[in-house]
Amino acid sequence: MINRKTSVLLFYLVVSFLGIDITSAQQRTLKGKVLNKNKLPVEFVHAFLLKNDTVFVEGMVTDSLGTFLFKAEKGNYKLILEQFGGEYFNQHLELSQDVDMGEIEIDESVMLEGVTITVRKKLIEQKVDRMVFNVENSIASQGMSGLDALRNTPLIRLQNDNVSIVGKGGVAIMVNDRMLNLSGSELSNYLQSLRSEDITRIEIITTPPSKYEAQGNSGIINIILKKNPNLGWSGNINGAYQKTSFYGLGGNATVNYQSNKISSTLRLRQHDFSIRPEVIRNLVGTDNGIYTNEIRKDQSKAIGVNYTLDFTLSERQNIGFIYDYGHSNYNSNADGASIYESNQVVDSTLNTYQKQFWKTPRHTLNAYYDLKLDTLGKKVSFIGNYLNNTPYRVNDFSSINDITSNEDIARNTSDMTYNIYSGQADFMLPYNWLNIETGVKYTLFDNNSDLEYYNFVGSGYVINPQNSNVFNYEEHNYAAYISMHKDFNGIWSAKAGLRYEYTSLDGQTPGNDESIVIDNYGKLFPSAYVSFKPNDNHAFSLNYSKRINRPDFQSLNPFRWYINPYMYYAGNPVLMPSFNDNVELSYTFLGKLTAGLYNQYNRDGISNIARLEDGIYSNVMENSFNENTIGLRLNYYETFFKIWDLSLNTNGTFTKTTPTIPEAEGLEVYSMAYSVYNTISLNQNKTWFLLLNLTHDLPYVYANVIIQEQLNFSPGIKASFLDKKVNVSAVLSDAFKTLKSEGYSYNAGYRSEFYNYMDQRRFTFSMSYIFGNNRVKGVNKNVKFDEKSRAN
């Protein structure tokens, strides 16, 4: 355990290394401690700092020790302490130097006469490196789930279990500044378990700072929950019924406990859903082509448990861990046909029946230790992460040629083991004149896969060594970063950061004398932000960041996954990472309208390249294109008549791709997408809501592929009962059955076409019940574990 002397020594070593003069602070601090008549600290007292009696400067609540702390320029101020709508303390003071108010004793039974201060933040605020949506000021803060609150947030798109930021290919989600390591239906279940009343704000980070992993061109969504005001037990139970072409059930349960020293949360989740996808994939050339179609029944079953424990060691130290276990089973039965043509004449038809089984047990463990170095907010955090993921997949298929009547029976198996180990140290060093964040991180990826292909001969399966392989992959990532943030007179703000990542990787096939892939590279990832707020009505920001997209493990693994004897998908061990440069200019007006002009340049983009050689239809991952996108987005959020929240989002883009391999083709596409989210309160108590949500995408480019028009209209209704302890919703997604995935690309002289309808039209009825002391929000200490997304 680190003692106080060691902590102070470590702090000054870091300060000395960074060359910081801590004596040159320009701002002053005001702090104090609130006690009751029994000399016990009083938590959750609202402290307000006003300048010249009327101008609000900052507000906060006292912590578990009853303390508060403000930073402000020199001047005359008024300090007010209040709780439950009444004042306890009101005093003028001059802040010419650091002021310690000491112990302020209040009588909780006596309140001063005066005017209660109500500070209502704007719905939308533009910070130096992110946009903030203050959920607690919207209708979405009443009687809804966290998923619904997210759906109504500007810049965010939500379709089924997929969350994205407008203009971004994906997203990472944090809760209280800690990465949430869930995805798909598990993420959806977790967000459903949150109450919108528990959320104070949602932060949308379109160009992540250097503190975060450089991996991925996605943005970050940070959900900030309200602080726990009470001790004790709380929890909720959620259940959902879903109807697509089939019936399904899902649910989750959460139990929270909080005392003065211990906070813990147990979350259980489960689902059993089925869908009926329709899939068409064609490869059309001048002289020949392959036309495939498939109808499947996909069933997904999953269970999971998440346990979080946080323990306060002392006033300045706390430790904790997060354990998550998930086990999913996926079953798919498919009937398909492949028609082979030569010179527009059908050569043959291959009828294929597939039966797939895929199970994925996964363990994740995160442990952390936080140490406060002083009362001004300086802090160091140590985090360790471990992930074990062992997916096992079997595909049995039989194919019959209607011309020759020959039948091929085969089995493809995939046995993989992913292990990820990482450790990091982060220093937060706020000063009155400059805020500094710095840290280091190490990550080890250790992954092994064994893929086997069997032909059915006689009465049993015989392995086919030519179509089987073993691939072992190891990757080491070393990272260090520093970030600095400075506010200037409340009008200008600037932030700059630099992250360095060094990668060493080695991929081998046992039996080969040489590695299939070996590489070492180091890269710098800068980020810079400037914001300008001339007054309360206008805010401008200019941001830049550089990112990297490393290939995931399956994209690197050269195994062939066969759909039938003449069609397969394969990874590519010589794939290189792609790099992204992002520049964005944003403007916010009256906290309601935001506009963003951005440019994204992607170098060495990765896509699936289709080829037809010797009658074999292959799909192999390649670095195949460079891409530049110029975009303009507009977002408007307004509340009409205090009952109707309208969120309107539009995004127009021009995308140009340039091929880097002969098989690919360049594209130039203008596109536009818009969404309209309506939440309408139907009664005075705001317990009944009507939901009318629409998204519409015109054709756009994704990874050198043109995606055709998509439309989704999803109406619904929500209701709350028993003081909002019971919440019920009924939603019809994709009411007109128009949310399809259809597109095409040109590869090696062939037009590769696809059409997928994943049974998106669905009716979902859900009910949740909140029990216990519902003001206890639970532990939301989510540790950053960004590499987890690559273990898929």
Image: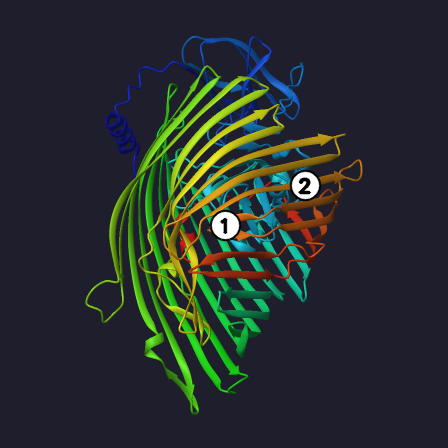
Q: Residue at the spot x=65%, y=32% of the render?
A: 637
Is residue 437 something that shows in the picture?
A: no
* Closer to us: 543 or 641: 543
Quarter where residue 475 is shown: bottom left
Percent across and percent down for residue 44 are 56, 29
Side of 630 relative to 379 (left or right) = right
For the view shown, which residue lies furthest in the left direction? 513
For the residues labelled 2 and 1, the Cα–Cα distance comes to 24 Å
Q: Secondary structure at mark 2?
A: strand
Q: Quadrant of the N terminus?
A: top left
Amino acid type, residue under disc 2 in the picture: Tyr
Q: Residue at the spot x=67%, y=44% of the render?
A: 144
Q: Nearer the viewer, mark 2 or mark 1?
A: 1
What residue is shown with label 1?
702
492 to 479, vertically: above or below: above
* Closer to us: 163 or 145: 163
Q: Residues within 10 Å of mark 2 (few under 14, many from 20)?
A: many
* Closer to us: 281 or 396: 281
Q: Residues within 10 Å of mark 1 (few under 14, many from 20)?
A: few
Percent across and percent down for residue 758 are 60, 61
Q: Quadrant of the C terminus?
A: bottom left
Q: Residue at the spot x=55%, y=52% of the render?
A: 707
576 to 214, vertically: above or below: below
Amino acid type, residue under disc 1 in the picture: Tyr
Residue 346: numbered disc: none
Residue 677: numbered disc: 2
Is residue 732 something that shows in the picture?
A: yes
Q: Secondary structure at mark 1?
A: strand
